[in-house]
Amino acid sequence: MTTSERHEAICDEFLIHAERELLEGDLLQAAEKAWGAFAHCMNSISQRKGWKVGTHQRLRANTNRLLEQDPEHARYRRLLFGAVESLHANFYQELMTADEVRRGIANARELVEALRELANTGQQPVQQNPILDPRHSKDP
């Protein structure tokens, strides 16, 4: 198994663990596992593309670089990324409720799927998440 394939496997494992930790009430671990799933997915993609990895700054830069390949959906997907990144911050601050962590895990799963599609095909239609999609806002 290549390093890239190992990152992909860890991503999938961490998404499962995140949901399990949430059910068990360990919000810190649930949030961090969802963040970790995203990070491993992005590191896998970055390695396959020959992009440098290893720091949070590079992770952010590589994510934005990949998201820009589909400008039509980049803004929405950056919102997903911000929501998923907040899961990582929660590990240190313990600010999120169980419902927020649950939504964060769903956001991580959606972002991972979008990143994989972008990496494999360039551009794919995005399935909008009504929690973050401004078109579904109740505000006038």
Image (spheres, grey):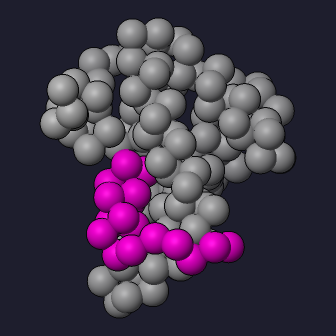
Q: Position of residue 53 (x, y in %)?
A: 80, 40
Task: Write the residue at 70% across / 49% down.
Answer: 3
Q: Which quadrant: the C terminus?
A: top left
- Main secondary structure of the magenta stretch: helix
32 to 126, vertically: above or below: below
Task: Tell me residue 124's x, y (percent).
Answer: 33, 18
Image coordinates of residue 63 in percent, x first then y, are 62, 31
Residue 97 seen: yes
Residue drawn at x 83%, y 46% as measured from the top left: 55
Boundaries of the magenta span: 92-109
Towards the viewer: 19 or 100: 100
Say whether residue 94 is magenta: yes
Residue 56 horizontal side relative to residue 73, left or right = right
Count of numbered labels shown in the rendering = 0
Residue placed furthest toward the bottom? 24
Q: What's the residue at 53%, 22% (across, down)?
A: 67
The residue that appears at 53% across and 61% down in the rendered structure is 87
Quarter of the image where one finds residue 42: top right
User: Can residue 32 be seen from the camera position used here?
Assistant: no
**Residue 139 located left or right of residue 23:** left
Q: Quadrant of residue 6?
A: bottom right
| Residue 122 versus residue 59 in the image, above or below | above
**Above or below — where is 6 with respect to 4?**
below
Is residue 32 located in the magenta-colored stretch of the structure?
A: no
